[in-house]
Amino acid sequence: MKEEIVQITVKVTKEKAEILKTLSTKKHMSMSELVRRFIDKGLNVESYKEDVDFFAGIVRAELTSIYNINDIKQILDIQTNRLAKMIMKIGKISSGQLFLLINMFLRMIDISDEDRFDEILSQSISNGIDYMQKKDFAINPFLEDTENLKNISNKLD
C-alpha cells in the first residue's frame, strides 16, 4: 500500500536554497527528494530525543522509587572515594618509580657529567607534563606513533 503524498510549500533563504540545490546535484537526486530525506532525518532525531527523555524519566522514577536520593548519593560517594584512593596509590607508586629511576641513573653516570643528567631529568619531566596534559582521545595515537616517541627520547641524549 502506497502512502498518500501531500504537497506543501516551504520558504527558505536564498543561501539555503543554493545549498540545497548544490547538495541535490551532488547526490544526483531531486531537490524534493533531498528535502524529504532531511525532514525524515529531523523527525527521527526529534523522536529519538523524545524517546531518550521518556526512558530517562522512567529510569529516574524507578531508581527514586527503590532508593532514596540520599542512598544513591551515599553509594556514589563511596565509589568516588574508592576511585580517589586508587588514583592516590597509582600516584605514590609512580613517584616511587621516578625516584628509583633517578637514583639508578645517578649511580650509573660519571659525577662530572651531572649537569648533563640535570638537563635530561628536566627535559624528561617536561615531556611527562606534556603527556599528562594530553586529552584522552589523543593518548593512544601518541603512544602508537613509535617514531615520534623515539624522536622525543633521542632529544634527551
Image (spheres, rainbow, N blue to C red):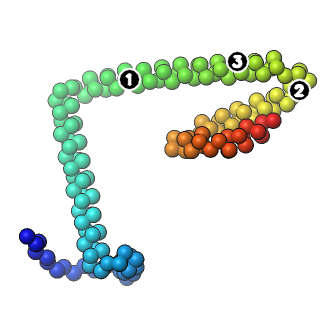
| Residue 8 drawn at (x, y percent) | 18, 79
Badge 2 marks a residue whose secondary structure is: helix
**Residue 97, quarter of the rendered image:** top right
Determine if residue 1 is in view: yes
Q: Residue at left 59%, top 19%?
A: 93
CA gap, disc 3 and disc 1: 32 Å
Residue 139 is drawn in which quadrant? top right
Q: Are marks 3 and 1 in contact (CB under 8 Å)?
A: no
Residue at the spot of label 3: 100
Q: Work out whether mark 3 precedes mark 1 in sequence or the reverse, and give the earlier one.
A: 1
- Dot 3: few (<14), some (14–19), or many (≥20) neighbours within 10 Å? few
* SS assignment at label 3: helix
Q: Position of residue 38 (x, y in %)?
A: 29, 69
Q: In the rendered view of the protein, which quadrant contains the N terminus?
A: bottom left
Q: Residue at x 81, y 17 (%)?
A: 107
Q: CA distance from mark 3 to mark 2?
A: 19 Å
Q: Which residue is mark 2?
A: 113
Closer to the camera: disc 3 or disc 1? Answer: 3
- What residue sits 88% from the left and 26% below the top? 113
Vertical arrangement, residue 53 with respect to residue 29, above or below: above
Residue 134 appears in the picture as rendered? no
Between residue 134 and residue 143, name the one nearer to us.
143
Q: Say whether residue 72 is left or right of residue 3.
A: right
* For marks 3 and 2 on the same chain, the one whose residue lies earlier in the sequence: 3
Q: Looking at the picture, which amino acid does disc 1 mark?
A: Gln
Nearer to us in this view, 133 or 104: 104
In the picture of the structure, the residue carrying the numbered disc 1 is 79
Quarter of the view holding residue 65? top left
Report the Cα–Cα distance between label 2 and label 1: 48 Å
